[in-house]
Image: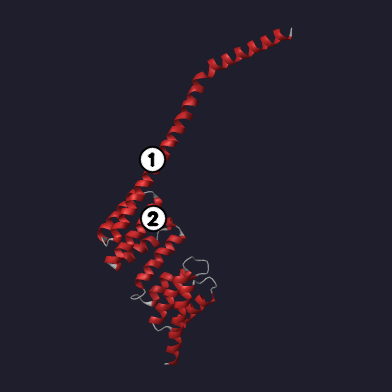
Amino acid sequence: MSDIFSEVDEEVRRERLKQLWDKYSLLIIAVAVLIVAGIGGWRGYEYWVAQKAAAAGAAFENAVTMSEQGKHAEAQAAFAKVVTEAPAGYAVLARFRAASELAQVKAEDAVKAYDVLAADSTLGGTWQDLAALRAGLLLVDSASFDDMRKRLEPLTEPTRVFRHTARELLALSAWRARDTAAARRYVELISADAETPPGARTRIEALSALLAADGKS
């Protein structure tokens, strides 16, 4: 008797499933197609991104090779092309390298390029600080101490990544401007910072000796 009831229950289940299938079959098929299409589309997108990144990497390396060969104009043009065609990561690197190539030809134009980068908030603080520092490196021998201070003073704060180099550049600029008090202040900041790299510490000790000699003369 239990077998008969089991057969009846099974028949009822089949009938219900058939009714559900008849009612929702088109929807079920559409959802399945969408899932398959979505997976295929995502795989295609991943492949496209990978191909684009590979092409950008090759173009960037080609521009670097031109730079190493001293073909600065060609390298600059190649980096500029990467900026317009490559994904964000390579585009940012290319902008910095393009500015670096300009520095080999005309420092003033390179400073302007770095200033644009330093003002671009979409890059993030670290990249902006790096751009400001690169401009400062190009200007340290020619710009006034006031100009250098406007550019680099924010970078000397204890939490900034490039504070050591910024302080060193400002100490040197102050010494060149014969602002002994300012130069000594930056020397003290560098000396007191436990994270100051050994190379910077050595250079600042030499500058400190020059300041001491100036004080005796």
> Which residue is nearer to you in this view: 76 or 177?
76
Where is residue 60 shown, x and y percent of the image? 34, 53
Q: Amino acid at mark 1?
A: Trp
At label 2, the amino acid type is Val
- Residue 153: image x %, image y %? 45, 71
The residue carrying mark 2 is: 92
Number of numbered markers: 2
Residue indicated by mark 1: 48
Horizontal arrangement in the rendering, residue 194 relative to residue 118 (left or right): right
Q: Is residue 88 above or below residue 188?
A: above
Residue 77 location in percent, x, y? 27, 56
Mark 2 and mark 1: Cα distance apart in space: 20 Å
Q: Residue at x 42, y 74 (%)?
A: 169
Label 2 sits on a secondary structure element that is helix
Foreground residue among 214 and 30: 214
Q: Quadrant of the C terminus?
A: bottom left
10 above or below 131?
A: above
Residue at 39% across, 73% down: 148
Place of residue 88 in the rendered image (x, y in percent of width and height, measured from the top left):
40, 51
